Structure formats: C-alpha cells, structure tokens
Image (tube, rainbow, N blue to C red):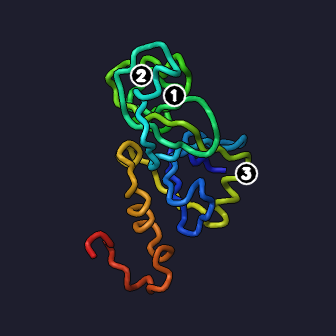
Amino acid sequence: MESLQGKLLVASPALEDPNFVRTVTLMVRHDDDGALGLVVNRPTRTSLADVWDRIADTPCRQSPLLHDGGPCEGPLMLLHRGEGHADHEILPGIYFTADRANVRPLVAGDEAIKPFVGYAGWSSGQIEEELGTGSWLVIDARADLVFDADGTTWGRLAERLAPELLYPDVPADLFPTDPSLN
C-alpha cells in the first residue's frame, strides 16, 4: 500500500455521500491502520475567536473561520506552516496539530493557522476500496491548495483532473487544454 499522506482527495462528481460531495480533503495520515483527512474547502460561518473562550482560558489572537473537517467528531485541529508546535509534518511546509499543548501557543501567536472541527476517518482498507470505485481523484497537495481553499476549489480541481466526469456528454477530444480559457 502506498501512503496517501500529503495528497488531496478530490471528490468525484459521482460521489453521493453528503459528507463529501464537492470536497477537497487533505490526507493527514494514511497507513495500514486506516486514514485521517481534513476537508479543506468547507469553511463554517464561525470564527475561531467566537468559540475560543468556551474551550480554553488562554488568549486568542487569531480569528480565521473554523472549517468543517469531516463527519467524525474530534478535538480542535490546526494546519499550519511552522515546524514549531507541530504534532507531525504532513508534507514539507504543512504541519498538523491536535495536541492541546501545541494548539494553545499557535492560537495565541502570529503564525497563520487553519482550524478544523471534525475530521474524515477511514478504517483499514476503506479508502483503498473507495479509490477503487472511482469515488476520489488524487492530486499532490500544495500549500496554496490547502491554505487558500474555498468554495471554488473543488470545481477548479475537478475540471482540471477529470472534465469528462463533469461533462459526460462532451467528447474528451473537444475539451480545451486549459478549460479556464474557454
């Protein structure tokens, strides 16, 4: 099994699970025991500052929007770019933490963070099965795709990776090389 850690899973247009329709998920961990990912393109309307005083007694200098990381409940989780206070490095320049001792100084500091409530979890072999059914398109993650993801990210990536899935009635040879120029 090749690890998907550091990859983005782009939901196939055929994926009907409401938890993952039109999502882009960063694979934080993937090994023989299963996988953990964070949906990077589902911001909520609630900022971290709005809820911080309910979960901690330390200062909050950051107020990015919380992101709905997936259907599984878990602690507040952060993606960030600095090696300090990281639980582990997902790929060069992208770090993950859920450890409260690491979350607090990141929230109180100046380093840009992307906070998540919830996560996507898969048992051993489950993500491989979903890949086999064509539920996901896989692409290498980059910091800009992770930290700048918004409501348009899924459409841009899906159109680039598999336009024939978005427009099944259009022959593949009629697709422009760069659909954004169309």
Residue 107, visible in the rendered structure: yes
Mark toward the viewer: 2 or 3 = 2
The quarter of the displayed image where residue 170 is located:
bottom left
Q: Residues within 10 Å of mark 3 (few under 14, many from 20)?
A: some
Which residue position is annotated with label 1?
97
x and y, in percent, of residue 161 in the image: 45, 66
The percent position of residue 79, horizontal first and vertical second, equals 45, 34
Q: Which residue is mark 2?
A: 106
Q: Earlier in the sequence, mark 2 or mark 1?
A: 1
Circle 2: residue type: Leu
Residue at (44, 59) in percent of width and height: 154
Name above or below for residue 37 compared with residue 178: above
Instruction: Give 45 or 62, whichever is nearer the viewer.
Output: 45
> In terms of depth relative to the viewer, which is nearer, 146 or 32?
146
- What is the distance, in whole Å, between disc 3 and disc 1 at their CAs? 24 Å
> Residues at badges 2 and 1 in contact (C-beta under 8 Å)?
yes
Sequence-first disc among 2 and 3: 2
Front residue of 145/40: it is: 40
**Amino acid type for the residue under numbered disc 1:** Thr
Q: CA distance from mark 2 to mark 3?
A: 34 Å
Residue sitting at x 46%, y 46%: 40
Secondary structure of the residue carrying tag 1 is strand
In front: label 3 or label 1: 1
Q: Which residue is mark 3?
A: 125
Tell me where residue 33 sits by quadrant.
top right
Q: Residues within 10 Å of mark 2 (few under 14, many from 20)?
A: many
Q: How many marks can you see?
A: 3
